[in-house]
Image: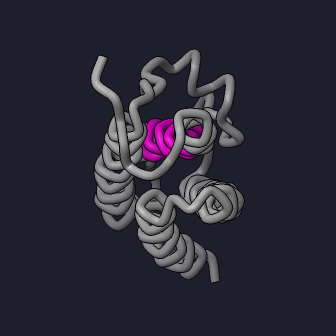
């Protein structure tokens, strides 16, 4: 086994990876929810929301990939099953198909929840002097914040 010498000890890398795994789980559950909404949105807002939801799930997929790859770079394994994701995610999967604006509202609230949880993890990362993971997560927070604002704007 290759030794990892990046200035973060093994125990701290595990703590960091566990925090990042929570964000990965949240992003993946949110990805599936956005995909559900993309597939199932109906009504007068369809032509606008269908491509918006697609854009959201595609971005979330790429963001989750970045997080998983950071976990691997730290020498840990990324969770990769929905059972694992659902057990640690604060974001709840969607069962059924809500009304179009309820979909927007739920995605906005879930983005805000993911922002709050990401900021909690950033605090841990900073305390363990992992600026690489903290910077990566802050990039995600900026993207999530912009999307949350755009989603909320549909509800005004």
Q: In the drawing, does residue 77 fall left or right of residue 128?
A: left
Q: In the drawing, does residue 102 fall left or right of residue 5?
A: right
In the image, residue 14 above or below residue 105 = above
Q: Quadrant of the N terminus?
A: top left
- Please state the horizontal and vertical placement of residue 36, each as a whole percent of the image: 45, 37
Residue under the point 50% across and 45% down: 27
The stretch drawn in magenta includes residue 144: no
Question: Magenta stretch mostly in which secondary structure?
Answer: helix
Q: Quadrant of the C terminus?
A: bottom right
The stretch drawn in magenta includes residue 31: yes
In the image, residue 43 above or below residue 38 = below
Q: In the drawing, does residue 53 fall left or right of residue 128?
A: left
- Please state the horizontal and vertical placement of residue 144, each as a whole percent of the image: 50, 67
Judge by depth and name the residue closer to the eye, 99 or 7.
7
- Please state the horizontal and vertical placement of residue 109, each as a whole percent of the image: 68, 60
Residue under the point 57% across and 56% down: 107
- Please state the horizontal and vertical placement of residue 125, each as a whole percent of the image: 60, 57
Q: Can you see residue 116?
A: yes
Residue under the point 39% across and 31% down: 75
Magenta residues?
20-34
Colour mapping used in the image? one colour
Judge by depth and name the residue closer to the eye, 110 or 103.
110
Judge by depth and name the residue closer to the eye, 126 or 20.
126
Judge by depth and name the residue closer to the eye, 18 or 75.
75
Q: In the drawing, does residue 98 fall left or right of residue 13?
A: right
In the image, residue 67 above or below residue 120 = above
Residue under the point 68% across and 23% down: 87
């Amino acid at each position: 086994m290759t030794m990892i010498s990046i200035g973060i000890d093994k125990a701290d890398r595990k703590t960091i990876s566990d925090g990042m795994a929570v964000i990965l789980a949240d992003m993946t559950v949110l990805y599936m929810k956005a995909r559900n909404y993309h597939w199932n949105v109906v009504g007068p807002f369809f032509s606008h929301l269908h491509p918006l939801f697609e854009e959201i799930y595609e971005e979330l997929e790429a963001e989750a990939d970045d997080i998983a790859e950071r976990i691997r770079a730290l020498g840990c394994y990324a969770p990769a099953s929905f059972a694992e994701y659902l057990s640690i995610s604060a974001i709840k999967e969607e069962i059924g198909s809500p009304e179009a604006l309820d979909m927007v509202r739920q995605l906005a609230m879930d983005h805000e929840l993911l922002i709050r949880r990401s900021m909690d993890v950033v605090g841990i990362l900073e305390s363990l002097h992992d600026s690489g993971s903290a910077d990566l997560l802050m990039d995600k927070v900026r993207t999530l914040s912009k999307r949350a604002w755009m989603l909320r704007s549909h509800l005004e």
